Amino acid sequence: MSPTPLPATGAPVPASDANESIRRFVCARGGRPWTTQDMTEYAVLLEIWTLAVRAEVVEAA
């Protein structure tokens, strides 16, 4: 499963969408040990989620 891409506008995806992508990613691994590629993909998903949450906080302020 590939990470949730950023929209073409460069605007972050909604945090709820990014969170759902993380949830699906983790569930798909079914408790198996993670490979180096899994950890790299997870790091990308976390970065996308972080940007999304940060954008929502800034927007709310």
Image: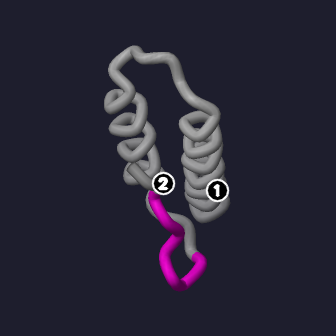
Q: Residue 4 in the image: state x and y as whole percent.
A: 45, 58
Start and end of the magenta stretch? 4-10
Q: Which mark is residue 8?
A: none
Residue at which label 1 appears: 51
Q: Nearer the viewer, residue 5 or 33?
A: 33
Horizontal side of residue 61 vs 25, given as left or right: right
Q: Quadrant of the C terminus?
A: bottom right
Q: Residue 44 in the image: state x and y as whole percent.
A: 61, 50
Q: Is residue 6 magenta?
A: yes
What residue is drawn where x is 64% and y is 42%? Answer: 40
Q: Nearer the viewer, residue 61 or 37?
A: 37
57 w.r.t. 7: above or below:
above
Q: Which image quadrant for residue 37? A: top right
- What is the three-letter code of the residue carrying label 1? Leu
Horizontal side of residue 54 vs 22, given as left or right: right
What residue is drawn where x is 55% and y is 47%? Answer: 45
- Which sits earlier in the primary sequence, circle 2 or circle 1? 2
Q: Residues within 10 Å of mark 1 (few under 14, many from 20)?
A: some
Q: Is residue 1 magenta?
A: no
Q: Nearer the viewer, residue 36 or 5?
A: 36
Q: The residue tagged with tag 2: helix, strand or loop?
A: loop
Residue at which label 2 appears: 3
What residue is drawn where x is 57% and y is 45%? Answer: 41
Q: The residue tagged with tag 1: helix, strand or loop?
A: helix
1 w.r.t. 35: above or below:
below
Q: Nearer the viewer, residue 40 or 57?
A: 40
Q: Which image quadrant for residue 39? A: top right
The mark closer to the camera, 2 or 1, is 2
Q: CA distance from mark 2 to mark 1?
A: 14 Å
- What is the three-letter code of the residue carrying label 2? Pro
Q: Which image quadrant for residue 20? A: top left
